[in-house]
Image (cartoon, rainbow, N blue to C red):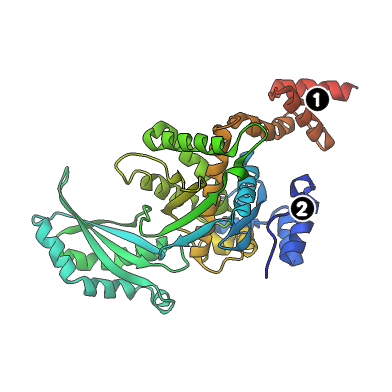
Amino acid sequence: MSIDSRLPMFRAMSPTERLSHLQEVLGLPQEDVALLSDAGALPLEIADGMIENVLGTFELPYAVASNFQINGRDVIVPLVVEEPSVVAAASFMAKLARDAGGFQTSSSLPLMRAQVQIVDIDDPFNARLSLLRRKDQIIELANRKDQLLNTLGGGCRDIEVHTFAQSPRGPMLVAHLIVDVRDAMGANTVNTMAEAVAPLLEEITGGTVRLRILSNLADLRLARAQVRIAPELLTTAAYKGEEVIEGILDAYHFAVVDPYRAATHNKGIMNGIDPLIVATGNDWRAVEAGAHAYACRQGHYGSLTTWEKDRQGHLVGTLEMPMPVGLVGGATKTHPLAQLSLRILGVKTAQELAEIAVAVGLAQNLGALRALSTEGIQRGHMALHARNIALSAGARGEEVNWLVKQMVEARDVRADKAAELLKHKRAQ
């Protein structure tokens, strides 16, 4: 089904009106609408089975980002996040990108690593070659543990052996099982394989196996996004597009050379990615861990994105990073709203989900760099933050919009100011 992700006037609607409009755009059945409109979408008995010591559930705002066009397909993106400006910034940048052809994405195979640590080895270099000589036997043993994955076209594909001849604990080998996990995130699969091959690795090397665990640095499982925007699309009342591009390039290169800036720069990228990962029931901690480790791959912590200017003077942005996400297993299969999020996205494979995630991350990064290089981050951010301040001051219903308007116009967004204004209004 072809959809239109632009969602005109969506921001001005009430939550009920937005849900009704989304139902019409996506053709959502009434049971899906009920998941979003009724409290308690995650039943307590299901929550109790997901983690330990459950007392209840904890909700965050569930929103959708509009305007995204990815590889020519319109996508409405569900986001679960508490931070103001994230959804607005992603939607606005997607609108600019849409006018320039949208985002182009690609991805590598869903390959994950399982690590098997081997200690008590006197001849690590010889032991490494012994493991590689019996690679086929190790792979065959690993694949016995997941016949279903094999029938789906996945399975253990290769092994690597990393030698640490002079660790503080003596010589150490670390064998990596390279596993195609298909549409799973893959943690349980690769961990099971690592445990299965451990006795054989001990037999071959004469050493002792310690850790058998996946690596969250999924550097073989990459997702990529690209965008190209003409200067005129970045022009504002106060800034020419060419000026905006130069400012963005300066801001980007600041993140390239300075890890203090890069940490905040990359956090802005994850502002877009994490809410989608949460909305789909995936492991956002794993995605975060892999992202920041990957940002160090050149020997220092730097920017995950790149921003350039092409020969025509267009701004060109790219993002390539690990994206270990799945459509099966874990909360993606047990949480009703995670399943709904996948239906809203219309994805059929984990690679599609990964590519949408990096497109949102690239959009979010563009939004932050554009704001920082022009009027500054606080103007737009504080206008949206004013809603939280108004709510915390006790404003309800129409009072919220009135109070936000008063604080933004006065450029004075503070809790005490909100309380003072609200008290005065109610006294009248």
Closer to the camera in the image, 149 or 303: 303
What amino acid is found at the position of numbered circle 2 in the picture? Answer: Arg
Q: Which comes sooner in the sequence, label 1 or label 2?
A: 2
**Residue 359 % position (x, y):** 53, 53
Q: In this figure, which residue is indicated by the disc labeled 1?
A: 422
Report the disc number at residue 160: none
Q: Nearer the viewer, mark 1 or mark 2?
A: 2
**Which quadrant holds the C terminus?**
top right
- Note whether 260 is above or below 52 in the view shown: above
3D distance between C-alphas at marks 1 and 2: 28 Å
Other-residue count near label 1 (Cα within 10 Å), few / some / many at <14 / 14–19 / ≥20: some
Q: In the image, residue 362 lies at what x, y percent?
A: 52, 48
> Residue 393, how many percent across, how many down?
74, 28
Question: Is 301 left or right of 8, judged from the image as shown?
Answer: left
Mark 2 burial class by Cα count in 10 Å: few <14, some 14-19, many 20+? some
Q: Is residue 5 left or right of residue 318?
A: right
In the displayed orientation, state which residue is furthest to the front: 312
**Which quadrant of the figure has residue 299?**
top left
Q: Residue at x 80, y 47 (%)?
A: 14
| Above or below: residue 124 compared with residue 204 | above
Q: Amino acid at mark 1?
A: Leu
State the SS at label 2.
Answer: helix
Indicate left or right for 426 with 244 as reference: right
Instruction: Report the front residue among 404 and 367.
Output: 367
Mark 1–mark 2 CB contact (< 8 Å): no
Which residue is tagged 2?
A: 18
Picture residue at 78% right of the left edge, 45% below the top? 12
